[in-house]
Image: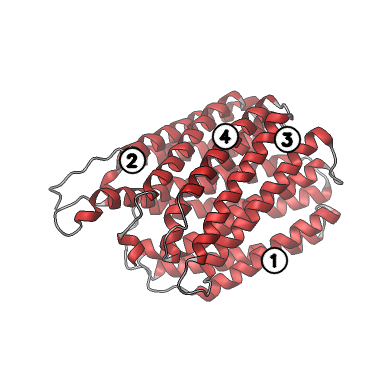
Amino acid sequence: MNMITKQHPELYPIVRAHYLASAVCFVLIGVLFFFASADFAGHYFQPKLLAITHLAALGWVTMVIFGAAYQLVPVILETGLSGYRLPWLSFVAFLSGLVLLVCSFWRFEPGLCMQGGALLLLTGMLGFTIVIFLTGKRLKNKKENIHQEMINTSCIWLLATGILGVLLVFNLRYAFLPQDHLQFLRLHAHMGMGGWFLLLVIGVSSKLVPMFLVSRKQNLQLLDWVYYLLNGGLLAFVIDTYLEGINNRTYLIALLPAAAFIIYFIYLIQCYRSRMKRKLDLPMMYTVLSFILLLAALLIQPLIINAHVQNTTQGIALTKLYGLLVLMGWLSLLILGQAFKTLPFLVWLKIYGPGTGKEPTPLPSDLYSQKLLIIQGIAFTGFILSMITMALSGLATPARIASGCLLLTALCYLLNLTRVLTHKKTTGHA
């Protein structure tokens, strides 16, 4: 593909800014995790937990997704990015809004700063969505493929999540929403996790995983089923939960996304079994393991539904565990792996691309430290185990251990990321 051998000179700075900002947010999460250790024993609707959750969902995960999307969407769609000024404006608005929102949540001051932060974040989301849609318009072949449909639909879910988030922020001050605030918070969370994160990850990974594994078999018809089942289930959940709350029908509705996940896992297994690249490197191992964490989170869903239907207190602990497994488990491990599959190639292309084939060059995998990647994996494993213990026991001690492991993971990630971004040209590699 032409897009793999060439890149616009303005692409690298905008991608670098997003990755660095996201990595700094990841380190801050580790620090704030420690100071909020005692809060994890209670309900998830608490100021410090809201601050950490939004810093993780927006600053850590969404920020790096924005940067990666600017790099990968042109590759997936085989066209150039629509422009480079709007991504910068979106970045500034998004980062400014994030600072205001997180600080306001931590101190729980639902005033102008929180409201302004929410509006700036929504502005950043809108800018990103416009860039992605305009990029899709540049396709010579106007017929959308399933990957583009998933990416575009995930952007619509992102805007819907952002709009509801803004309404929730203003509702804290003026209380105008017709239903209970926690009811809308539940919808807000599922729209973000299912519609934005999950749909986008499936849309991008279903293209990249076969590419990295050099798979011979890609059954794209399976992805059509995934798309309609996942969106249908999410829409049904939002409408039914808004009207009736969590009820017995929720079990049936949950079968739709469950079927979508099963079909997608079948797609991934087929890609894995038909791979030509037999040995998995560490980043791809992290990617495979991340989906195991997603599967673990999905297995908890029936228990959460049952707890809400039966109105038991177990629902709070299970909901915290589910959120942690999805946000800090699946998505975080996916980023920790894929960042070192995609970013090193972008840096390599910038430094060595013009001289490809003319002189010996290092591989993209030579740009990062394998040792740091191993330490990062060990620390993250400790974080996951401590996090599960914390969520189930409600004790503060596992939360403090988890914060230490998370901070070590984040520092290793930041150091390795910096190593890649500050790489200087070398020659002489065989």
Label 4 environment density (alpha carbons within 10 Å; few <14, some 14–19, many ≥20): some
Cα–Cα span, label 4 and label 1: 34 Å
Residue nearer the viewer, 48 or 330: 48
Cα–Cα span, label 2 and label 3: 38 Å
Horizontally, residue 36 falls left or right of residue 312, namely left
Secondary structure of the residue carrying tag 4 is: helix
Which amino acid, by three-letter code, is at mark 2?
Leu
| Between discs 2 and 3, the one toward the N terminus | 3
| Between discs 3 and 1, the one toward the N terminus | 3
In the picture, which quadrant includes the N terminus? bottom left
| Between discs 4 and 1, the one toward the N terminus | 4
Q: Nearer the viewer, mark 3 or mark 4?
A: 4
Secondary structure of the residue carrying tag 3 is: loop
Which amino acid, by three-letter code, is at mark 3?
Phe
Residue position marked by numbered label 3 in the rendering: 45
The image's mark for residue 96 is 4
User: Which residue is pictured at 46% across the width and 54% down the height?
Assistant: 83
| Between discs 1 and 2, the one toward the N terminus | 1
Tell me if residue 389 can be seen. no
Residue nearer the viewer, 230 or 261: 230
Q: In the image, residue 2 lies at what x, y percent?
A: 33, 65
| Between discs 2 and 4, the one toward the N terminus | 4
Residue position marked by numbered label 1 in the rendering: 232
Which amino acid, by three-letter code, is at mark 4?
Ser
User: Which residue is pictured at 84% across the width and 37% down the height?
Assistant: 175
User: Which residue is pictured at 81% across the width and 53% down the height?
Assistant: 242
Does residue 175 sit above or below 163 in this rendering?
A: above
Cα–Cα span, label 3 and label 4: 24 Å
The image's mark for residue 421 is 2
Cα–Cα span, label 3 and label 1: 28 Å
